[in-house]
Amino acid sequence: MSLIQSGKIFNDGEQLTAGKLNQILSDATLSTTGVDGTSIIINANDALAVRSINSSRIDNGAVITDKLPDSTVTATDGTPDGVTFPKIQHIETDKILGRTTTGDGIVETIGLNTDDAMASASDTTLATDGSIKTYVDSKFLTPSRGYNNLAHSTTSGNTQKNETGRPLWVSFTLLSSGGGLNYLLGELSPNDDMSAPNTRIGQSRVVGQSGNSSAGQVTMIVPAGYSWKFSYSPSSTTEKVHSSFVL
């Protein structure tokens, strides 16, 4: 179909004049059937116009990365830094972009773990520096390291548990006046009731002479969460000192 419609249609036998010839062009119009109506249209002023482009008028795969406009230049060296952030898919709060799935592939969102106790830590999340600091501080700064600041029993065979959250150095010293020390044993176990597996860490035996004093000491390091006990004989010892230090 012709794009231009003549401004004058002649009939058979009609007389030709200069005015009628001029009318062919002066009154000519553009035919809407001569354009596709999708990319090219005839506008209200009877003029050819390119129709506005939207997503429905772009073929799949027609836009490539090189055709995306650069954003503002970087503040450091003035180099265009690529596509602007508003053009990138929005993500949720406490998420960063990365990939945890094995192999190359589509970018994924990775969760930020703000659990200060790290109880919910996993292989597919990242801890924030604030949570890492809080967690580390809880292991190294508390409880305050102090000597003999915990109450300990001096009863033979009494079990106690290290609930400080840190390794605990413990020591037990006995003084027996006027007789020998049969034994002083130190044991620890991961179980509260000192059941197996339990480990005998140290043993002290002193054979005293009548009328002379004798003493013995056993020290050991108790891991966090472990239980320990000191056992001794005879029970009639003169002095008993059970001390500790949080490491």
Image: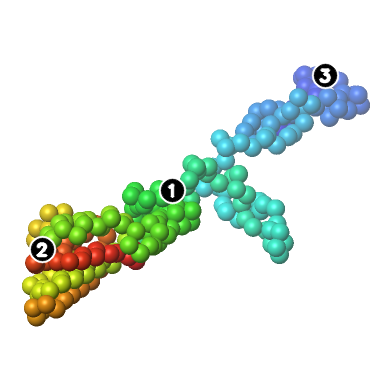
Residue 196 in view (yes/no)? yes
Find disc 3 in the rendering and name its residue: 14
Q: Residue at x 57, y 41 (%)?
A: 58
Find disc 2 in the rendering and name its residue: 235
- The Cα–Cα distance between marks 1 and 3, rounded to whole angstroms, is 92 Å
The secondary element bearing badge 2 is classed as loop
Q: Residue furthest right?
A: 18
179 vs 31: above or below: below
Which quadrant is home to the C terminus?
Answer: bottom left
- Sequence-wise, the earlier of marks 1 and 3 is 3
Q: Are there few (<14), some (14-19), or many (20+) residues within 10 Å of tag 1?
A: some
Find disc 1 in the rendering and name its residue: 114
Q: Quadrant of residue 138?
A: bottom left
The secondary element bearing badge 1 is classed as loop
- Sequence-wise, the earlier of marks 2 and 1 is 1
Say which of 56 and 47 sits in front: 56
Q: Residue furthest front?
A: 211
Q: Is residue 118 left or right of residue 85?
A: left
Which quadrant is home to the N terminus?
Answer: top right
Say which of 90 and 129 sits in front: 129
